[in-house]
Image (tube, coloured by chain):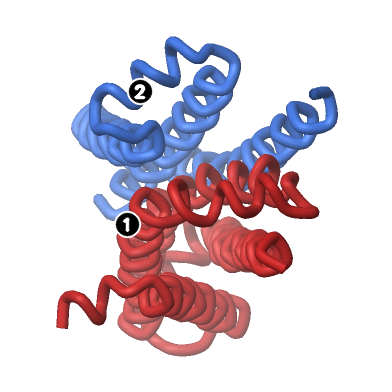
Chain colours: A blue, B red
């Protein structure tokens, strides 16, 4: 079943896309030159982050899909579970960061 | 026609409408998974509708955000009674939204498995959590959108 390899690749790619988006977002808030650099690519920092999330997802998906040699149900299960927890954690980190940033002004 | 479609109230309506459709589709997928009901093709249809809807909401919302929200709405909120609605809710919303499409692609790929494959690989429970998280994140983003809209309205008054 190649479907499991594809699901595994997608879960890993989505997880790395989320980590990248979170890191780049917080990095941009902490460093104005970095935010300006993001803005310089597309004219708006959010459009650059949108493209970055797609590019990271696509590149990691293709790489992991090609490099995955064997079907592994346990590995796929853990990758999807990790994606769920990572999404919740990254959402809380971003919300918490903006709450902290606003309240500490 | 283009002028009508790019009118601000229409853009907001389409952004919200696609988001609601996406949330509903992943709630449907969640129900299919929990009930062990239906064929893989029905799950795939629900996930595909959800993914397409979230992509539609992303593009339309992004166009509105870049062209209208930043120059017109954000200054009103920041000068109003709840500037935190932009500083917290909008900032979190616009970035958490970027998590949704990669997750939805994974949910679509998971929905290709039939019931036997889902159970034998032990993927039913993770798939349920993924579909539920997609709907939950969508609803949380919707709540933040409501806060932002309310702050903008009260910022004007």
Residue B76 in sight from this viewpoint: yes
- Secondary element under disc 2, as helix, strand or loop, is helix
Residue drawn at (74%, 27%), measured in percent from left and top? Answer: A101
Name the foreground residue: A88 vs B119: A88
Residue A70 left/right relative to B72: left
B18 relative to B99, above or below: below
Quadrant of the image for the N terminus of chain A?
bottom left
A34 relative to A8, above or below: above
Residues behind callouts 2 and 1 on a single chain = no
Of all residues, the one furthest to the left in this rendering is: B1
On residue B150, the disc is none
Subunit ID for the residue under disc 2: A
Name the foreground residue: B144 vs A22: B144
Of all residues, the one furthest to the bottom in this rendering is: B38
Contact check, label 2 and label 1, Cβ < 8 Å: no
Residue drawn at (62%, 66%), measured in percent from left and top? Answer: B149
Residue drawn at (53%, 12%), measured in percent from left and top? Answer: A31
- Secondary element under disc 1, as helix, strand or loop, is helix
On residue B63, the disc is 1
Residue B100 locus on image (x, y percent): 47, 54
Subunit ID for the residue under disc 1: B
Residue A84 locus on image (x, y percent): 59, 48
Q: Disc 2 versus disc 1: distance between alpha carbons?
A: 18 Å
Q: Which residue is mark 2?
A: A38
Residue drawn at (48%, 36%), measured in percent from left and top? Answer: A18
Residue A88 locus on image (x, y percent): 66, 45
Of all residues, the one furthest to the front in this rendering is: B157
The quarter holding residue B52 reads: bottom left
């Amino acid at each position: 079943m190649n479907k499991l390899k594809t699901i595994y690749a997608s879960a890993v790619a989505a997880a790395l896309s989320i980590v990248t988006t979170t890191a780049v977002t917080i990095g941009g808030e902490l460093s104005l030159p970095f935010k300006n650099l993001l803005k310089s690519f597309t004219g708006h920092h959010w459009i650059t982050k949108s493209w970055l999330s797609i590019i990271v997802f696509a590149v990691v998906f293709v790489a992991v899909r090609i490099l995955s040699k064997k079907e592994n149900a346990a590995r796929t299960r853990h990758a999807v579970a990790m994606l769920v927890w990572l999404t919740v954690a990254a959402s809380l980190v971003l919300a918490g960061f903006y709450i902290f940033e606003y309240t500490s002004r | 026609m283009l002028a009508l479609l790019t009118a601000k109230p229409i853009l907001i309506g389409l952004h919200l409408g696609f988001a609601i459709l996406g949330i509903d589709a992943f709630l449907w997928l969640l129900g299919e998974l929990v009930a062990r009901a239906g064929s893989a093709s029905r799950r795939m249809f629900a996930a595909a509708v959800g993914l397409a809807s979230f992509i539609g909401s992303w593009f339309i919302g992004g166009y509105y955000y870049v062209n209208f929200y930043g120059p017109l709405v954000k200054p009103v909120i920041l000068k109003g009674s709840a500037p935190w609605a932009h500083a917290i809710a909008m900032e979190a919303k616009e970035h958490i939204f970027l998590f949704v499409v990669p997750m939805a692609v994974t949910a679509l790929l998971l929905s290709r498995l039939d019931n036997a494959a889902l159970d034998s690989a032990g993927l039913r429970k993770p798939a349920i959590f993924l579909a539920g998280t997609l709907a939950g994140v969508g609803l949380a983003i919707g709540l933040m959108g409501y806060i932002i809209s309310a702050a903008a309205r009260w910022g004007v008054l």
